[in-house]
Image (cartoon, rainbow, N blue to C red):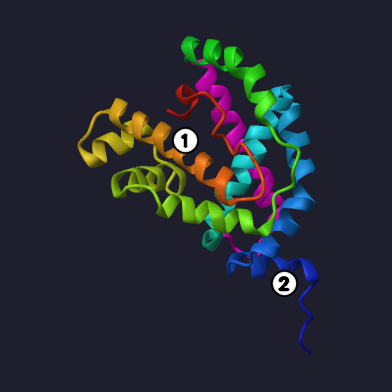
């Protein structure tokens, strides 16, 4: 007897295949739970929101690495926990990062939109990346898709860490500008976070 595939399992399979509607459905289902989880660790609504949004950006970019036979809920919570701890480590080891984070907190809050992510957003995001110059695109993908640090990227490409950081800041600004023009939504997706925290 063939076991029927549950609607949730099928939704995850569609998401892995690149279905933007399935991604939106998963976003709507898990966003609040993941944000609450991140808030329990950070005690910061702003930081919890930034982290949760980056989790969803990362799982869309790396969707082909998701194993549909494993718990998707567990996968999301592990990803959120790991990203949250990484954020806190970065802030803790840099006084400049802490100061810049708090100085920009209020402004970033003002920039946060209450809109829900639509299916067209994911397509616009990928289009925005493709619009970047080749080197910026490469550095952005090494950082976001392969999870490499600025130091690791600098060593791999034979350039300075500051050059990598400058390219990342420029790439994020370009992506944000593209989304503001081409997408009917405004989601900060880490872009409003001070650049020093991205190192």
- Residue at the (35%, 29%) spot, across then down: 166
Determine the residue positioned at 79% across, 52% down. 29
Q: Position of residue 34 (x, y in %)?
A: 73, 41
Residue at 65% x, 29% y: name it.
111
Magenta segment boundaries in residue numbering = 66-93
Residue 22, horizontal then vertical, whole percent: 70, 64
Compare residues 86 and 189 and report the one nearer the observer.
189
**Residue 140: x %, y % from top left:** 40, 43
Most foreground residue, 160 or 174: 174
Q: Main secondary structure of the magenta part?
A: helix
Q: Which residue is mark 1?
A: 173
Query: Which quadrant does the C terminus fall into?
Result: top left
Q: Which residue is mark 2?
A: 10
Q: Is residue 177 above or below residue 5?
A: above
Residue at the extreme bottom of the image, as rendered? 1
Q: Furthest residue to the left?
A: 158
Q: Position of residue 90 (x, y in %)?
A: 50, 23
The answer to whether residue 186 is above or below residue 70 is above
Mark whose residue sits in front, 1 or 2: 1
């Amino acid at each position: 007897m063939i076991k029927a595939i549950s609607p949730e399992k099928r939704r995850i399979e569609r998401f892995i295949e690149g279905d933007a509607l399935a991604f939106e459905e998963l976003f709507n289902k898990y966003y609040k739970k993941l944000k609450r989880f991140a808030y329990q660790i950070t005690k910061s609504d702003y930081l919890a929101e930034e982290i949760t949004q980056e989790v969803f950006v990362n799982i869309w970019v790396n969707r082909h690495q998701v194993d549909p036979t494993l718990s998707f809920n567990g996968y999301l919570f592990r990803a959120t926990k790991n990203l949250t701890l990484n954020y806190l480590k970065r802030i803790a080891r840099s006084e400049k990062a802490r100061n810049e984070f708090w100085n920009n907190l209020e402004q970033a809050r003002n920039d946060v939109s209450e809109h829900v992510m639509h299916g067209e957003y994911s397509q616009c995001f990928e289009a925005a990346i493709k619009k970047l110059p080749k080197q910026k695109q490469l550095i952005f993908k090494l950082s976001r898709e392969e999870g490499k640090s600025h130091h690791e990227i600098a060593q791999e490409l034979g350039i300075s860490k500051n050059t990598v950081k400058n390219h990342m800041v420029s790439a994020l600004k370009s992506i944000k500008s593209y989304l503001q023009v081409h997408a009917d939504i405004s989601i900060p997706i880490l872009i409003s976070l001070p650049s020093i925290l991205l190192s």
